[in-house]
Amino acid sequence: MSRSAARACIAMWTIASTAAAADSGPEVVVYTALRPSHWDLYLFDKAEQPPRQLTDEEAIDYNAAVSPDGRWLVFCSERGGNPDLHIIDLNDPGAPKLLLDSDAMEDAPAFSPDGKHLAFVSTRDDNADIYVVPFSPDGLQAAEMVNLTQHAAGDFNPAFSPDGKQIAFSSDRDRYKASEIYVMHSDGSAPKRLTSSANWDGSPAWSADGEFIYSYSAAPGRSQIYRMSPDGSGRQQISRDGEEALSPTITPTGRIAYAAKVDDEWQVVSVNADGTDHRIESDGQQEYWAPAFDPRGRLVCHGTRSLDDSDRFPDGLRGPFVVAAPQPVELPDRSLTVHSIRGSFPSVNAVTGQIASDQGFERVASSRLDGSDMQVLFQPDKGSAWRSTWTKDGRWLACGVGPTFARPGAHSDIWKFQSDGSEAMNLTNTPDANDAFPHFSPDGTRIAFRSGRDGNHEIYVMNSDGSQPTRLTNHEAVDTMPAFSPDGNRIAFTSRRDGDYEIYILALESNGAPGELVRVTNSPRRDTHPKFSPDGNWLVFASERGGMNDESPLIPVFNPQPYGDIFAKRLADRTVVRLTHNKWEDGTPTWGALPPD
């Protein structure tokens, strides 16, 4: 199909579906957020003594930097829903104040030696770049932000040299999902690469005399701390063999402190500049990362806080069901709210407003958007239950039961059950086929799904009782993750047929046969998990197109899917809006309408 014909086809689809959500309530995008919980900031007055807890939030606080005069603590917090810079006055600690508010991510703050400027990482221009701005404890002015790197790749973790003339940083511009150490002039000019690694070199820090740059390297398969000259020569390991180590920093006495795994838990340790005299600086009562020091030698870092059982959602990253505050978003033609939860593959019940999601890929549960009224609806006797979906009338759900990320011939089936969990039935029961990713048609009479029954992952449709399974695609590449449009005349899905995971829309003929196929995304990185808006005019999906927003070894989360953020695309004019900005894994979004008030 030509590009002009594809656009004409999409325009007709848009016109045909404008009334699909006329009687619906407020629209929500709900997605799965894989990120830690209950990270707070801690201040150690003395080594190995109990610290003072500086923050106490359900949202996470991390990556602190102390001003050269020791008064101001700037850090990243997600208490507002997305990562923003906040500030605490260490002379009079109280509630943190918002320092810079934006829809983008701001992270990894670093003060200039004179304290007059602040460097940090921002996704303001849609990928991670390093910015600098005049520092004021009363607030940073977005109009004064200067993008120093202006590179399409990710640039991370800036550090000023002691004389303020250079900035060291890490970047994945040489190899995606691997970083190197660079230096540049403090105005962003003359970037120079210092390291050459097959993996991650990151988190640079300057010695007090400017003679060395310290960083970690994950090249051997385990992160170690190294030092080198500012031209990249004379590289030498500092941390102990067998010790996993990250995030070096310099103490006021010239020792090198870093986060290290001690007895399988992350602690802050320090060594002499040559790696001798290994000491533990934190208290060993919980895990800590990203050390920083004030001029008096006090340690600031972020660490975990224990959770009681009532505040845990049963998945691999324990924490509350709601991950961050809901975010209002204005699209060109509507307003909506974006919600992040720990449940996987969320689905919205348009009648009751309940959210169905998976608990650790083991069982299907439902709850309200705030996590209340949580109840397990379905748990199979054998295998995992995942990717649940409601019928439009809210009476039935379907999900896949079987292994995830499996080959076409793995045994996985589509199950259906009532909204109270009763009448569970296996619709496919195909021992040699990987049947998964079910999605109901708007009238509830059909289910689109992904199957490997013919030796390859293809898109199928069947009646909602499991009868008459019919293959819709036939391509040697992977076709997967189907979703019906609100009018039932189209199916969006993800395919690798053009060498990369992109999103396609397949039109269905009046007899249900496959019709025109249109590719609707074209990015250099993966686009996955599409779902239509309630009126069918937009798609929401997860994508890698924003790139990496931090060094991967610093992100302690399970990350099996394409690393990414959530995006929305209007089909009529190809407008793309980025809905999330952070360093974590955001995926499996859905777009629904809650019941009218």
Image: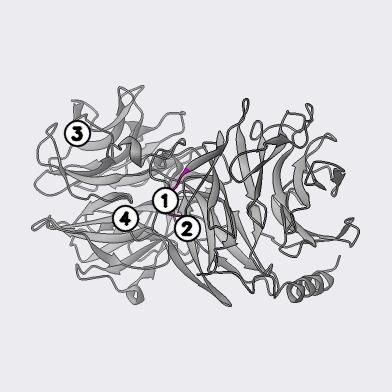
Residue 371 sits inside the magenta stretch: yes
For the residues labelled 2 and 3, say whether their Cβ atoms are less than 8 Å apart. Answer: no
Q: Indicate which disc, 2 or 3, sits on the residue closer to the N terminus.
A: 3
Q: Is residue 500 visible?
A: no
Which amino acid type is shown beneath numbered disc 2? His
Between the C-alphas of marks 3 and 4, the distance is 22 Å
Task: Say if the magenta span includes residue 582.
Answer: no
Who is closer to the viewer here, 581 or 55? Answer: 55
**Dot 1: within a 10 Å radius of its alpha carbon, few (fewer than 14), some, or many (20 or more) residues?**
many
Could you tell me which residue is drawn at 30 percent across and 36 percent down?
308
Provide residue 375's location: percent of width, then percent of height. Answer: 49, 41
Mark nearest the camera among 2 and 4 is: 2
Q: Secondary structure at mark 1?
A: loop
Q: CA distance from mark 2 to mark 4?
A: 17 Å
Where residue 486 sits, quadrant-wise, is: bottom right
Residue of label 2: 339
Q: Which mark is residue 77?
A: 4
Mark positioned earlier in the residue sequence (4 or 1)? 4
Q: Who's the residue at 40% across and 52% down the image? A: 156
Instruction: Judge left or right: residue 415 versus residue 560.
Output: right
* Label number found at residue 322: 1
Q: Marks 4 and 1: which is nearer the front?
A: 1
